[in-house]
């Protein structure tokens, strides 16, 4: 599980996530994060364009600016290419020429995956999986897709926490982890925020270990 940073928030987010794998978005990043915290994320840093957030707001990402931004953090585990989340896979392919690992979406033609696999190998061995909303009810597609992906690739599911327990899904990111911390804190006010986050981490770790659940359990999350 990678904790998403960069939404309008406070330094508490970065402080709590220190020492954990994190996802930082170009579109939602901020100077306080880049100047004060980025160098502290030395284990498990993943960079993303923030294409989905930008698509929802109607703003476009400057791909050149994104590439330059990602180049600053050369210690990151990987950085994602700028995918076209609205479903124009041809535009995604064009964008990937600028760098970053590719993402395969459930809205893409099935044959595109075969084209993205060798590209993923060239881009550090990472391949993203993206789902259109709502993300529920996609278990069959997820299973079929993951079975088609070679074992030598690291598969990251964008906002695929619902499917975190599936075999062959190597990592997912969470955008609601800070809200989950608040829920735990409300239930157990004697805990510190850091201790609440430890509970959230344990929940995800156990979900990954309990991979032998049936389909109905998986769909219910």
Image (cartoon, rainbow, N blue to C red):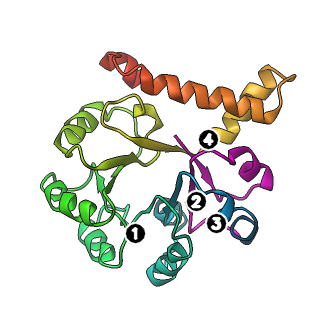
For marks 2 and 1, the one nearer the N-term is: 2
Q: What's the distance in space between the residues labelled 4 and 3, CA to CA?
A: 16 Å
The answer to whether marks 3 and 2 mark residues whose Cβ atoms lie closer than 8 Å is yes
Q: In the rendered structure, which segment of residues is drawn in magenta?
A: 1-30
Q: Secondary structure at mark 4?
A: loop
For marks 3 and 1, the one nearer the N-term is: 3
Q: What's the distance in space between the residues labelled 2 and 4, CA to CA?
A: 14 Å
Residue occupying image coordinates x 76% and y 35%: 194
Q: Is residue 127 above or below residue 216?
A: below
Residue 193, how many percent across, how many down? Answer: 79, 35
Q: Nearer the viewer, residue 23 or 63?
A: 23
Residue occupying image coordinates x 72% and y 59%: 8
Residue 139, how many percent across, how many down? Answer: 30, 31
Reading the image, the residue beneath label 4 is 176
Please give the label number shown on residue 197.
none
Q: Residues within 10 Å of mark 1 (few under 14, many from 20)?
A: many
Residue occupying image coordinates x 55% and y 70%: 73
The quadrant holding residue 210 is top left
For marks 4 and 3, the one nearer the N-term is: 3
Q: What's the distance in space between the residues labelled 1 and 4, CA to CA?
A: 23 Å
Please give the label number shown on residue 24.
2
Q: What's the distance in space between the residues labelled 3 and 2, CA to CA?
A: 7 Å
Give the side of residue 207 with respect to residue 31, left or right: left
Q: Nearer the viewer, mark 4 or mark 3?
A: 3
Q: Residues within 10 Å of mark 2 (few under 14, many from 20)?
A: many
Reading the image, the residue beneath label 1 is 82
- Taking the magenta stretch, the answer to whether it contains residue 95 is no
Residue 116, how many percent across, how many down? Answer: 21, 60
Residue 24, how many percent across, how many down? Answer: 58, 59
Q: Nearer the viewer, mark 2 or mark 4?
A: 2
């Amino acid at each position: 599980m990678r904790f998403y940073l960069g939404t309008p928030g406070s330094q508490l987010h970065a402080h709590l996530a220190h020492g954990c794998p994190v996802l930082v978005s170009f579109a939602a990043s901020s100077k306080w994060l880049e100047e004060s915290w980025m160098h502290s994320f030395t284990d498990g840093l993943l960079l993303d364009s923030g294409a989905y957030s930008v698509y929802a707001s109607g703003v476009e990402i400057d791909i050149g600016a994104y590439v330059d931004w990602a180049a600053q953090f050369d210690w990151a585990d990987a950085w994602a290419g700028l995918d076209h989340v609205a479903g124009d896979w041809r535009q995604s392919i064009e964008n990937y020429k600028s760098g970053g690992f590719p993402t395969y979406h459930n809205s893409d033609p099935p044959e595109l995956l075969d084209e993205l696999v060798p590209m993923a190998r060239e881009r550090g061995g990472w391949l993203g999986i993206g789902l259109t909303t709502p993300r529920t009810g996609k278990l069959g597609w997820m299973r079929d897709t993951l079975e088609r992906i070679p074992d030598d690739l690291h598969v990251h599911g964008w906002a695929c926490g619902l499917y975190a327990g599936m075999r062959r899904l190597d990592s997912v990111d969470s955008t609601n982890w800070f809200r989950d911390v608040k829920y735990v804190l409300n239930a157990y006010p004697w805990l510190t925020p850091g201790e609440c986050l430890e509970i959230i981490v344990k929940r995800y770790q156990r979900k990954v270990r309990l991979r032998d659940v049936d389909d109905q359990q998986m769909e219910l999350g």
